[in-house]
Image (tube, helix red, strand yellow):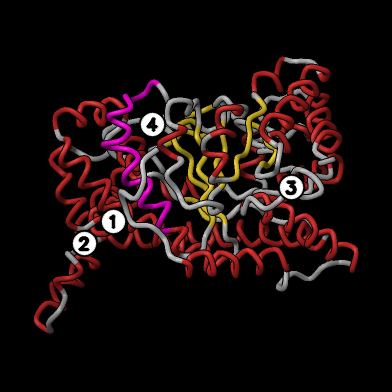
Amino acid sequence: MMKGRWLEIGPEAYQKQEARLESWAGGGRIEFKSPEAAARYKETATLFKDAIQLKKPPRRVPLDPSLGSFPMEYSGLSPYQAMYDLDAAIRAAQRFFDDFQPEAYAGAPALSGEVLDLLDFKMYQWPGHGLSKDRDFQYVEEEYMRADEYQDLIDDPTGWFLTAYFPRVFGSLAGLENLPILPSVNEIVMVMRAVLPFARPEARMALGSLMAAGEKAAEWLEGARAFSATLLARGCPATGGAFVKAPFDVIGDTLRGTQQVMMDMFRRPDDLQEACDRLAPVMVKAGVSAADRSGSPFIGMPLHKGADGFMSEKQFLTFYWPSLRKVLIGLIDAGLVPLPFAEGTYNTRLEIISDLPKGTTIWMFDKTDMARAKETIGQVACIKGNVPLDLMCTGKPEEVRRYCKDLIETAGWNGGYIFSTGAGLQGARTENVRALFDAGREYGAYS
């Protein structure tokens, strides 16, 4: 296990985290529908808080399965309807919560196809836009950042994203590519040249598209927030929050692409490392800002290219973990609770990622060996997961129950575990989802 290689946190970080978690668990800003709902909320939220902070085993294991698109599928809603009919999506989500009674939720329907249409988003295809209406959205991988632009990204991430990246991935925002270098507007003589690009028709079109998309997003998210308020009022804590990425994944997923970033590890290693380090504080600031607005202390972090088999351990230690750890430490130092989702397997990474302050993070695992995870990262962090999606889609209820029982006994002993799926529930059989919830409730109690 690696120790003390980067910045560590002080006692004030634990104090900040305690304050944020106490505020979240207390539910002070929520209008509960009854005293019973308020008590249920506080009891459930305290279970999560104790699991995160690795306190002595509470009464039971917290249940928080990752749902994916199952709530929409359960009501027969197509992927297209889920992205274009907010009322139908909310009715479907409400039906799921009424029927399955989950004790926590990660978020309300919050992805509008109309917003993506208005922006002409080129990085994805979605139902009704490049795909049939019965298909879920798909990523379109391209080289959205050229190799010779590393220095531009390092010098000014915000400026590069605004004037280079946005015009490439949003067809409606092509007019932003001629915007000035904003820090240069520091004297009166620079004002005229700075505002001149906004007179161009393409710039006006870009601003109009942003305004229209913003109005539609506000309308959609207002409906989603209203639905969330009903769940909170019933005593169901929200375990979702902000969303940031590992710096390497920002570059490898959505800037350079998989093929290019793999070559960059050999051809441009210094540029890649410097860019990852440059993006680390940007990710921290984005997470802190979102958390301060929402009041949620949780910061989701899907981890893609650090999984076993994608890169060697040496490459992981060189390119992936250093900047990821800086993001984790930065969020922890602000009192937040990072929730990295280790997609795929992390069996060869477990000792490395255990170099974190104790009781400050939740690590969600997909296919990782949970016995080894409990012995390693589970000694310093709460662990979560990993009921397999293939089991939920093709298995039988008795197989689901047996797997869940073994998983809870393996990962849940002595606390510090949140019961969850490994990769959502999309495509799962309804009878298996019922078995999942039943097993979590039956086997999650501590003796």
Q: What residue is shown at x 54% (from left), y 69% (from top)?
A: 15
Which range is magenta? 309-330
Residue 433 figure quarter: top right
Image location of residue 91, percent across then percent down: 78, 47
Residue 162 is tagged as 1
Residue most extreme to the bottom: 188
Magenta stretch, overall SS: helix
Q: What residue is shown at x 12% (from left), y 82% (from top)?
A: 187
147 left or right, relative to 120 = left
The residues tagged by marks 4 and 2 sit, at their Cα atoms, a distance apart of 33 Å
445 left or right, relative to 132 = right
Tag 2–tag 1 contact (CB < 8 Å): yes
- The answer to which of marks 4 and 3 sits earlier in the sequence is 3
* Camera-side mark, 3 or 1: 3
299 left or right, relative to 277 = right
- The answer to which of marks 2 and 1 sits earlier in the sequence is 1
Q: Which residue is mark 4?
A: 305
Residue 57 is tagged as 3
Tag 4–tag 3 contact (CB < 8 Å): no
- The answer to which of marks 4 and 2 sits earlier in the sequence is 2
Tag 1–tag 4 contact (CB < 8 Å): no
The crowding category of the residue bearing disc 1, from other C-alpha atoms within 10 Å (few below 14, some 14 to 19, many at least 20), is: some
The residues tagged by marks 4 and 3 sit, at their Cα atoms, a distance apart of 34 Å
Q: Which residue is mark 2?
A: 179
The residues tagged by marks 3 and 1 sit, at their Cα atoms, a distance apart of 48 Å
Q: Is residue 127 visible?
A: no
Three-letter amino acid code of the residue under disc 2: Leu
Q: Regarding mark 3 in the picture, which secondary structure is present there?
A: loop
